[in-house]
Amino acid sequence: MARVLLIEDDQAVRSALEFALRRHGHQVSAAASGEDGVALVREEVPDIVVLDVMLPGIDGFEVCRRVRAMGEVPVVMLTARGDDFDVVGGLEAGADDYVVKPVEPRVLDARLRAVLRRIDRENTRSTSVFGDLVIDRAALTVHKGGVQVGLTPTELRLLLELSRSPGQVLSREQLLKSVWDHDYLGDSRLVDACVQRLRLKVEDVPSAPVFVRTVRGFGYRFGPL
């Protein structure tokens, strides 16, 4: 059972999703505004946040950024549209995944469980050192130049997956399957947005990456070689 915080301003949608998520075995708290949602994240520290994009007051993008600044609680965005503005905006704000409304409760439940499974996966491999980047796979920590790097769970999983086989090219489809548990195509924006965020944290010059490199037409590989 996961502790889910649902941030949704539409009372009918909120009530329906609360009821459905409880039926799927989750413990659910709810907020009707971004401000209340941020306050509940601080107070309750949920296992995962389900966050609507369109909220009164501060919108879902800003809420996501504030949740990210507070720690590593995963966020799944609810978007009213499947267009690039909502999807990319949510991913750039730090969301781990997104679901387009109207959403079937069983689909949302499956997405939440997939995100939580990825976080709970144990990885016991030894520490890997790449120049000034140190990845401790047992402790699930990353240091650069002796300073710990604050990565979100999804960013960490992506780095672990890429660095598992340095030099090997991984397609976006492979990364979607291994990092996001998505076994279908069409969500490559998840990968690209997460790569951009990861580069900002582990690269000296994100526009000229040394560690997370693009292989045009194929995907990404981990360097340096």
Image: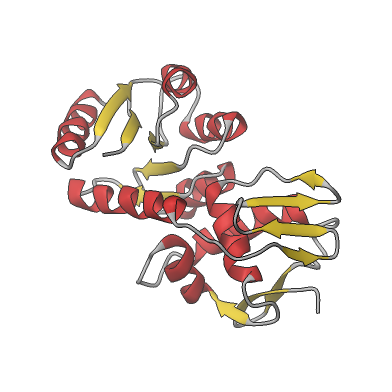
Q: Is residue 206 visible?
A: no
Q: Is residue 11 visible?
A: yes
Q: Residue at x 38, y 54 (%)?
A: 117
Q: Position of residue 189 (x, y in %)?
A: 51, 61
On the rendered image, what quadrant is the C terminus found in?
A: bottom right
Count of marks placed on residues: 0
Residue at left offset 48%, top offset 49%? 96
Q: Nearer the viewer, residue 158 or 133?
A: 133
Name which quarter of the figure residue 158 lies in.
bottom right
Residue depicted at 50% across the width and 45% down the height = 95
Tell me what residue is drawn at x 85 percent, y 57 percent.
205
**Image x and y of residue 11, in percent:** 23, 23
Q: Is 220 drawn above or below residue 119 in the view shown?
A: below
Is 155 displayed left or right of 114 in the figure?
right
Is residue 183 depicted above or below 123 in this figure?
Answer: below
Name the side, left or right, on which 188 lies relative to 167: left
Residue 215 versus residue 196 in the image, above or below: below
The picture places residue 87, in percent across and down from the top left corner, at: 46, 50
Colour scheme of the rendered structure: secondary structure
Residue 29 image position (x, y, % from top left): 30, 24
Q: Quadrant of the N terminus?
A: top left
Nearer-the-camera pick, 6 or 60: 6
